[in-house]
Amino acid sequence: MNEEIENLLHRENLTLASIQKRSVAFLIDEMLLSFLLIFALWDSFANAQTMQELVNLTNSFVLEYMFMKVVYQAFFVMQYGATLGKLAMKIRVIDIKNIDNPNVLISLNRAIFRVVSEMFFYLGFLWGMMDPNRQTWHDKTAKTLVINA
């Protein structure tokens, strides 16, 4: 573990969130956003006759879905230090520098690189599982940590 981060956690009496909690929070957020997309496009989904039509419809809105994910992640992390999934799992994101909720630029950076990580076969998430600080690519670029709330 990075000595600076280890000292910060000890000094502030903080603990890193477990991979299991982060994974469940991820699943909650993904399900929430997927249901939101389906709800918004219900007429189109209801009219699809085959599985191929559903796949084509989903693929046609991939950019909008990625934008929705960036806005969701950035807003909630900036405003509350956590997405709805993280709130449910009682974990939160902190800026390493000021040990508080990330500001708008840090939150946006984290949200964008989170989507980039997803595009590269979730390798950034895998990285976080092996990192001693449990920092994913998006945590590293934004200089954030996910801790127990």
Image: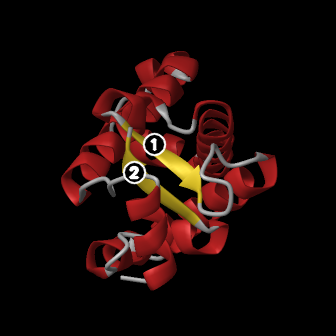
What is the x, y in percent for residue 87? 40, 30
Q: Is residue 67 above or below residue 45?
A: below
The answer to whether residue 121 is seen in the rendering is: no
Residue drawn at 43 percent across, 54 percent down: 146
- In the figure, is residue 141 to the left or right of 18? right
Assess disc 1: are there few (<14), some (14-19) or many (≥20) residues with their C-alpha within 10 Å of its C-alpha: many
What is the x, y in percent for residue 40? 57, 20
Residue topped by disc 2: 147
- In the figure, is residue 34 to the left or right of 105? left
Question: Quadrant location of residue 32?
Answer: top left
Assess disc 2: are there few (<14), some (14-19) or many (≥20) residues with their C-alpha within 10 Å of its C-alpha: some
What is the x, y in percent for residue 115? 56, 60
**Location of the N terminus (image quadrant):** bottom left
Local SS, label 1? strand
What is the x, y in percent for residue 129? 28, 72
Residue drawn at 24 percent across, 47 percent down: 21
Please count the marks in the image: 2
Residue topped by disc 1: 92
Seen from the viewer's position, the closer of residues 142 and 119 is 142
Q: Is residue 96 above or below residue 17?
A: below
Residue drawn at 46 percent across, 53 percent down: 12
Seen from the viewer's position, the closer of residues 130 and 48 is 130
Q: Check disc 2 and give the amino acid type.
A: Ile
The Cα atoms of the two marked residues, 1 and 2, are separated by: 5 Å
